[in-house]
Image (tube, rainbow, N blue to C red):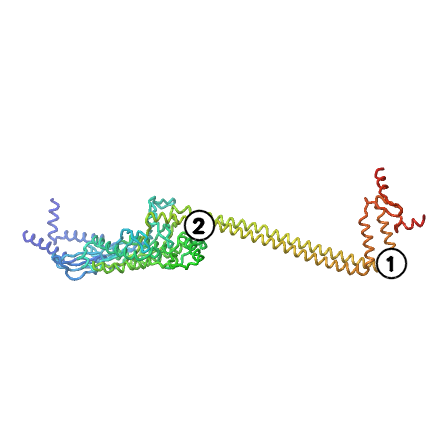
């Protein structure tokens, strides 16, 4: 109480030197505290004077008018923010944990062929213009989320389930990115989409076994065709080899046949030439020579009188004697 | 002391009066001024320091930013009599704070008024479009993993053509329909725009967030997807078997061709050789047929009479002629 009285008395008399000093110190302190501010790297400060946008300052030490005349808002412009759709990461890390909650209301969507697919995707974005980001849209994050859902469903809605699941995932992500960026720019949201990634694109759970069945059927098809192909590749070259052999053999036969015929013909012609010089003698000589060759080779030679009518008994007798 | 107290009181009053004569307007805000409840002047949209008559005039602040409106999913019938859940969202801003102040005043009221406006227009426009038109956004040609699998409809159509019926114009093919998803949202926006304007609201955007089947329909769609996949599986298997049969058939054909061609070639080669040999023999032996006969007979004796054989010579024979003479 006493002290308060003292202060009161002193503050009333503004001409007191000590009071002036104290006021000066307070003023300087307030100036320092509310006037100077630091902007960290990767941040920007948007300064408003009496609520109106005045300037945007980059990283470093800055001064603004104190006593609430100027007001700053720090925006992390370099920070990449992430939104997840159809799933939630509880704890990112080496073993990332995902929420067990059901987000199928976000992930299930209709395709252009009126099927249903389960799409999980992420959108990464950053602040492009901190002034726009702060002043143009009330709920930036919610707006981004809702536009992203709408854009993804629109792109998926124009594609077949096959295209969404397997054929054109990259293309879909790119189209979503473009559509989303366009919508945000339309609102001057001050947001730049960095990437859109189709994380998991699957058929809905009850349908998955049937989809897997298609894969195994496709593999089976490959297997069956490959087997037939390999059988073909085994049999046909072998048959070609056999055919080659058959032809080679025939050629061998032909050479053999012709050579022999030539030999035989030459021999005959040569002999004939000599024969013609002395036909009778030669004929006789050849006959005798032949007999001479044959007779010693034979086991039995019988000479039978031409008057003998039957020589069979004679042969039988000879056999019985053995 | 009294003089001091009066001075201080006057100073405080002066500060209050001066303070109430000024007000700041944030970039995110706009305002109107009322005097005894009646609006004075137009909307103040420029952020910064502003002046008013202290105490007598009152400032009402409104949002200047784009605001959210997210409707509840609605169960709506389409033109092709299918019930779907449609979820629409919109973005709006207070374009005329004065009208807004007079007609709805608070955001909550604005939301419920927008519910009525947008839901009604949505219902109207959805009912004029088919499900495919709502889901799809263009007439781009969709691709399928297996193009060759004929759909049931196509098979039926083929049947119709075989039966001599004309191709119907009720073509429900997904690719033949032009999607209007974006267009539908734009139509809703267009129709709702005027009604919203009466509330001092500018509808910035209306979009379709989600289109979903009813639960029972969803189950049916799952069943259809399963049977579709089964059809594709069966197609893969049967085309595999078909391809196998084709390859094996081709193999058989190729085999027959190779073997018969080889046989033909071999026969031709051999035949030519035989002919050549025959010609050579005929030329040679033709010089003296009787000598040929003689030589061949002798040769055949040599060949036919071998070691184990027995020769019976008649004394009549030429060979033994000399023996006879000697007798």
User: Residue A45: in sight, yes or no?
Assistant: no
Q: Which residue is mark 2?
A: B231
**Label 2: element kind:** helix
Q: Which residue is mark 1?
A: A279
Task: Name above or below for residue A88 compared with residue B60.
Answer: above
Are there few (<14), some (14-19), or many (20+) residues within 10 Å of tag 2? some
Q: In the depicted view, which residue is nearer to us: A11 or A191? A: A191
Q: Chain of mark 2?
A: B
Q: Is residue A235 left or right of residue A273?
A: left
Q: Chain of mark 1?
A: A
User: Residue B308: in sight, yes or no?
Assistant: yes
User: Farthest bottom residue?
Assistant: B41
Q: In the depicted view, which residue is nearer to us: B289 or B7? A: B289
Q: Position of residue B280 (x, y in %)?
A: 76, 59
Q: Residue at x 86, y 49 (%)?
A: A292
Q: Position of residue A148 (x, y in %)?
A: 33, 54
Q: In the depicted view, which residue is nearer to us: B30 or B86? A: B86
């Amino acid at each position: 109480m006493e002290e308060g009285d003292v202060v009161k008395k002193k503050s009333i008399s503004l001409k007191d030197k000590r009071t002036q000093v104290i006021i000066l110190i307070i003023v300087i302190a307030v100036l320092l505290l509310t006037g100077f501010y630091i902007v960290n790297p990767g941040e920007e400060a948007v300064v408003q004077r009496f609520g109106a946008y005045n300037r945007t300052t980059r990283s470093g030490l800055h001064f603004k008018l104190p006593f609430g005349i100027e007001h700053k808002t720090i925006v992390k412009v370099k920070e990449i923010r992430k939104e997840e759709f159809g799933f939630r990461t509880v704890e990112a890390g080496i073993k990332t944990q995902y929420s067990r909650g059901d987000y199928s209301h976000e992930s299930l969507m209709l395709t252009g062929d009126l099927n249903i697919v389960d799409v999980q995707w992420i959108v990464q974005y950053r602040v492009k213009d901190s002034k726009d980001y702060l002043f143009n849209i009330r709920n930036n994050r919610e707006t981004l989320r809702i536009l992203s859902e709408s854009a993804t469903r629109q792109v998926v809605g124009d594609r077949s389930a096959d295209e969404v699941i397997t054929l054109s995932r990259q293309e879909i992500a790119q189209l979503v990115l473009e559509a989303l960026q366009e919508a945000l720019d339309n609102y001057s949201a001050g947001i730049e989409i960095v990437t859109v990634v189709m994380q998991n694109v699957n058929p809905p759970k009850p349908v998955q076994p049937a989809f897997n069945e298609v894969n195994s059927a496709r593999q089976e098809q490959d297997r069956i065709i490959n087997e037939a192909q390999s059988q073909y590749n085994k049999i046909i070259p072998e048959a070609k080899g056999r055919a080659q052999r058959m032809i080679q053999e025939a050629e061998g036969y032909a050479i053999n046949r012709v050579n022999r015929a030539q030999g035989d013909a030459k021999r005959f012609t040569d002999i004939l030439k000599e024969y013609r010089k002395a036909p009778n003698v030669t004929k006789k000589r050849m006959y005798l020579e032949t007999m001479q060759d044959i007779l010693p080779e034979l086991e039995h030679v019988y000479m039978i009188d031409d008057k003998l009518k039957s020589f069979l008994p004679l042969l039988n007798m000879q056999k019985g004697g053995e | 002391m009294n003089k001091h107290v009066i001075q201080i009181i006057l100073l405080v009053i002066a500060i209050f009066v001066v303070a109430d004569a000024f007000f700041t307007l944030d970039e995110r805000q706009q305002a109107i001024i009322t005097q005894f409840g009646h609006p004075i002047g137009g909307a103040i949209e420029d952020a910064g320091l502003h002046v008013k008559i202290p105490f007598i005039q009152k400032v009402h602040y409104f949002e200047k930013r784009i605001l959210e409106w997210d409707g509840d999913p609605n169960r709506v019938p389409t033109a092709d009599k299918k019930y779907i859940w449609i979820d629409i969202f919109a973005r709006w801003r207070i374009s005329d704070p004065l009208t807004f102040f007079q007609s709805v005043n608070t955001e909550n009221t604005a939301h419920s008024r927008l519910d009525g406006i947008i839901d009604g227009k949505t219902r109207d426009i959805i009912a004029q479009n088919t499900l495919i038109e709502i889901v799809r956004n263009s007439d781009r040609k969709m691709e399928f993993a297996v193009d060759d699998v004929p759909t049931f409809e196509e098979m039926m159509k083929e049947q119709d053509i075989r039966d001599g019926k004309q191709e119907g114009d009720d073509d429900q093919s997904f690719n033949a329909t032009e999607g209007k998803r974006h267009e539908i949202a734009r139509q809703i926006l267009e129709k709702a725009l005027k009604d919203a304007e009466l509330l001092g609201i500018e509808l910035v955007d209306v979009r379709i967030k989600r289109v979903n089947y009813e639960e029972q329909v969803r189950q049916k769609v799952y069943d259809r997807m399963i049977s579709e996949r089964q059809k594709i599986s069966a197609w893969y298997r049967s085309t595999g078997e078909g391809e196998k049969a084709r390859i094996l058939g081709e193999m058989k054909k190729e085999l027959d061709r190779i073997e018969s061609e080889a046989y033909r070639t071999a026969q031709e080669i051999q035949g030519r050789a035989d002919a050549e040999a025959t010609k050579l023999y005929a030329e040679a032996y033709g010089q003296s047929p009787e000598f040929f006969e003689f030589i061949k007979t002798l040769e055949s004796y040599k060949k036919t009479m071998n070691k184990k054989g027995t020769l019976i010579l008649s004394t009549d024979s030429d060979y033994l002629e000399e023996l006879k003479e000697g007798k």
